[in-house]
Amino acid sequence: MSDSSGEHEPSTPSEQDNDPVKDLPGVFALLTMGTTVAIIIAVFVVLGIWADRVWATAPWGLLIGITLGTVAAVVSVVKQVRRFL
Protein backbone atom coordinates (compact mmCIF):
# COMPACT_ATOMS: atom_id res chain seq x y z
CA MET A 1 0.00 0.00 0.00
CA SER A 2 1.25 3.40 -0.85
CA ASP A 3 1.10 6.47 1.36
CA SER A 4 -0.78 9.18 -0.51
CA SER A 5 -0.23 11.99 2.00
CA GLY A 6 1.88 13.89 -0.55
CA GLU A 7 4.98 14.02 1.64
CA HIS A 8 8.23 13.03 0.00
CA GLU A 9 10.98 11.61 2.14
CA PRO A 10 14.45 11.50 0.57
CA SER A 11 15.18 7.88 -0.15
CA THR A 12 18.77 8.08 -1.32
CA PRO A 13 21.80 9.78 0.27
CA SER A 14 22.24 12.02 -2.78
CA GLU A 15 18.72 13.41 -2.32
CA GLN A 16 19.43 14.09 1.36
CA ASP A 17 22.62 16.03 0.51
CA ASN A 18 20.74 18.39 -1.80
CA ASP A 19 18.28 19.54 0.86
CA PRO A 20 18.50 23.38 0.86
CA VAL A 21 16.98 23.68 4.35
CA LYS A 22 19.93 21.76 5.81
CA ASP A 23 22.36 24.45 4.55
CA LEU A 24 20.51 27.42 6.08
CA PRO A 25 22.43 27.54 9.40
CA GLY A 26 25.69 27.76 7.46
CA VAL A 27 24.34 30.53 5.26
CA PHE A 28 23.19 32.53 8.28
CA ALA A 29 26.60 32.06 9.93
CA LEU A 30 28.32 33.45 6.84
CA LEU A 31 25.92 36.39 6.69
CA THR A 32 26.60 37.08 10.36
CA MET A 33 30.35 36.99 9.81
CA GLY A 34 30.19 39.35 6.84
CA THR A 35 27.95 41.79 8.66
CA THR A 36 30.16 41.68 11.74
CA VAL A 37 33.30 42.39 9.72
CA ALA A 38 31.66 45.32 7.93
CA ILE A 39 30.31 46.89 11.12
CA ILE A 40 33.54 46.49 13.10
CA ILE A 41 35.71 48.01 10.35
CA ALA A 42 33.21 50.83 9.76
CA VAL A 43 33.15 51.73 13.48
CA PHE A 44 36.94 51.88 13.71
CA VAL A 45 37.23 53.91 10.49
CA VAL A 46 34.69 56.43 11.80
CA LEU A 47 36.60 56.63 15.09
CA GLY A 48 39.83 57.19 13.15
CA ILE A 49 38.28 59.98 11.09
CA TRP A 50 36.90 61.54 14.28
CA ALA A 51 40.35 61.38 15.91
CA ASP A 52 41.89 63.05 12.86
CA ARG A 53 39.41 65.94 13.05
CA VAL A 54 39.71 66.42 16.81
CA TRP A 55 43.50 66.23 17.05
CA ALA A 56 44.39 67.31 13.45
CA THR A 57 46.52 64.20 12.91
CA ALA A 58 45.35 63.23 9.41
CA PRO A 59 45.86 60.56 8.07
CA TRP A 60 47.20 58.75 11.14
CA GLY A 61 43.89 58.37 12.95
CA LEU A 62 42.31 56.84 9.85
CA LEU A 63 45.24 54.46 9.30
CA ILE A 64 45.21 53.37 12.94
CA GLY A 65 41.41 52.95 12.76
CA ILE A 66 41.68 50.76 9.66
CA THR A 67 44.42 48.67 11.28
CA LEU A 68 42.60 48.20 14.58
CA GLY A 69 39.32 47.51 12.78
CA THR A 70 40.92 44.85 10.61
CA VAL A 71 42.55 43.17 13.62
CA ALA A 72 39.29 43.25 15.58
CA ALA A 73 37.37 41.85 12.58
CA VAL A 74 39.84 38.98 12.13
CA VAL A 75 39.64 38.13 15.84
CA SER A 76 35.84 38.15 15.64
CA VAL A 77 35.78 35.88 12.57
CA VAL A 78 38.26 33.45 14.17
CA LYS A 79 36.04 33.22 17.26
CA GLN A 80 32.95 32.60 15.11
CA VAL A 81 34.68 29.96 12.98
CA ARG A 82 35.99 28.10 16.04
CA ARG A 83 32.39 27.48 17.14
CA PHE A 84 31.92 25.30 14.04
CA LEU A 85 35.16 23.32 14.35
Image (cartoon, helix red, strand yellow):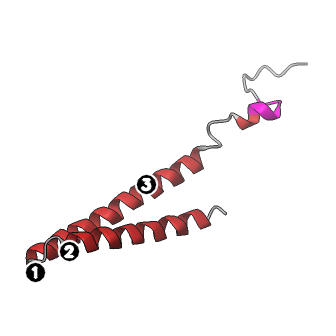
Q: Disc 2 versus disc 3: distance between alpha carbons?
A: 24 Å
Q: Disc 1 versus disc 3: distance between alpha carbons?
A: 32 Å
Q: Nearer the viewer, residue 56 or 4?
A: 56
Where is residue 58 drawn, in percent x and y? 13, 72
Q: Which region is colored magenta?
A: 9-15
Kind of residue at badge 1: Trp
Q: Which residue is mark 2?
A: 61
Q: What label sits on residue 55 in the rendered view?
A: 1
Q: Nearer the viewer, residue 54 or 10?
A: 54
Q: Quadrant of residue 69?
A: bottom left
Q: What label sits on residue 18 in the rendered view?
A: none
Label 1 Cα crowd, 10 Å radius (few <14 / some 14-19 / many 20+): few
The residue located at (62%, 39%) in the rendering is 21
First along the sequence among labels 1 and 3: 3
Label 2 Cα crowd, 10 Å radius (few <14 / some 14-19 / many 20+): many
Q: Is residue 82 within the magenta segment?
A: no
Helix, strand or loop at label 3? It is: helix
Left or right: where does residue 38 sit relative to residue 26?
Answer: left
Of badges 1 and 3, nearer the viewer stands 1
The residue located at (33%, 64%) in the rendering is 41
Left or right: where does residue 54 sit relative to residue 14?
Answer: left
Q: Is residue 12 within the magenta segment?
A: yes
Q: Which residue is mark 3?
A: 34
Kind of residue at badge 3: Gly
Left or right: where does residue 53 sit relative to residue 13?
Answer: left
Kind of residue at badge 2: Gly
Q: Nearer the viewer, residue 10 or 45?
A: 45
Where is residue 46 drawn, in percent x and y? 21, 67
Q: Mark 2–mark 1 contact, CB under 8 Å?
A: yes
Label 3 Cα crowd, 10 Å radius (few <14 / some 14-19 / many 20+): few
